[in-house]
Image (tube, grey):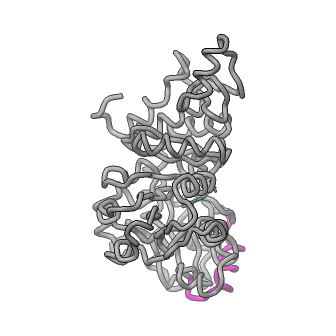
Amino acid sequence: MSETQQPATRAITAGRAYSRTSLAPALWASTTWECEGLADASRRATATRAGEFYSRYSNPTVRSFEEAIAALEGADDALAFASGMGAIATVIFALCSTGDHIVAQRQLYAGTLAFLQGPCQRMGIETTLVDGTEPGAFAAALRPGRTMLALAETPSNPRLELVDLEEFGALRGPITVVDSTFATPLGQQPLAYGVHISLHSATKGIAGLNDATLGVIAGEQELIDAVWAYSVLHGSTPSPYDALNAIRGIRTLAVRTAHQSASALHLAEVLAGEPSVAAVHYPGLPSHPQFDLAKRQMRHGGTVLAIELAGGRDAASHFLDSLQLARVATSLGGPETLVCHPATSTHASLTPAEAAAAGVSDGLLRISVGLEDTADLVSDLTNALPR
Ligand SMILES: *Cc1c(COP(=O)(O)O)cnc(C)c1O
């Protein structure tokens, strides 16, 4: 792998080690491999991430996906999981014990928040939530000797708020983890700022075709190996079929994200001029409060935007009913433009106070911009606005 390759080129060259001369990724569906007697079986059973032993420990197709992600993130290594939540739960339980403390931002994917406030709290792992957009907020909440993990998500779900990666990567004491799902590995590189672990729900933009449920982390070898040692017990093991689909997704990631980001920016500009739209949240828009930060740490504004309709929940309901092209569905990063109403779907489990803290208002809609023609999307979305 050449250090000088651009990310778009790495997306084509990476993750080919276990496919021999086959240009398409090879599917290794086997759960187990034959060993050459006792010594060989013993070596494979006890080595870290030994190949060709048992698929919960390592699988060549999954390994190809992991190597591709490591190449895109500029990391020593990567580790895949059965889902993004599988990655989050495994990382937290691999690194934290009863009595430990986590600092996380309050603008979090609802599943992550529920995991911190449910199972983690039940196990005696305490979390302090801070405003991730506020300078110094993470550092101020650290408890020296107790804070094991700092968890950021940027851009955040669903309002596209940013965490300053330079500041976050400079935190000393905890292991720093960035959920970089909304940016994809081509949109930003948290590890370049000293962050320890970059995490993705690869279900979203990385796999990119709504046909794989997958999570992945990337970072330094020692840390990834430590998480791996716990992961074989936690068992959130990715399917090689999903890893295969995700490698296919990576091959087109650069062109997909470039097109989708350009469309998202155009839609954000058009929707910002509509009287029924009270606010547009998109990091690539100069009116975004963190536009300068977005320009510093992101290669593009991303494929997701959020809008707030002045008419609240009734207007949101009218909008969803009026769409002809965009679909009402959760998830993001796929070829079809998807619109969801976080207050009643992804964030429905939050209390009103939590929803308010997360910026989830009744008129808020999250739009994942797909691969349709941009002009067709503009007319579909503007036609669905309440008049
Ligand atoms: C979807 C998502 C997750 C969870 O990923 P799954 O693959 O659905 O388990 C975590 N973080 C963010 C930002 C997400 O968008």
Question: Residue 191 location in percent, x, y?
Answer: 36, 50
Asked if residue 294 shows in the view, the reply is no
Q: Find ligand 1 in the image and state its quadrant.
A: bottom right
In the rendered view, does 261 fall on the left or right side of 214? Answer: left
> Would you place residue 271 above or below residue 194 in this image?
below
Please identify the quadrant where the C terminus is shown. bottom right
Coordinates of residue 158 in the picture (x, y in percent): 54, 70
Vertical side of 243 occupied by 94: above or below:
below
What residue appears at the point 53 percent right and 32 percent down from the top-left corner? 48
Q: Is residue 345 magenta?
A: no
Q: Is residue 10 above or below residue 111?
A: above
Say which of 104 and 305 sits in front: 104
The residue at 37%/55% (across/down) is 195
Q: Position of residue 143 (x, y in %)?
A: 40, 72
Q: Quadrant of residue 147?
A: bottom left
Q: Residue at x 42, y 73 (%)?
A: 132
On the question of residue 88 being in view, the answer is: yes
Q: Quadrant of the N terminus?
A: top left
Is 315 colored magenta in this rendering? yes
Q: Quadrant of residue 329?
A: bottom right
Q: How many marks?
A: 0
On screen, residue 138 versus residue 349, left or right, reads: left
- Residues shaded magenta: 309-324
Identify which residue, 272 or 224, lies in the foreground. 224
On the rendered structure, is 125 left or right of 103?
Answer: right
Image x and y of residue 15, in percent: 49, 30
Between 385 and 69, the one nearer to me in the picture: 69
- Front residue of 128/130: it is 128
Q: Quadrant of residue 113 in the image?
A: bottom right
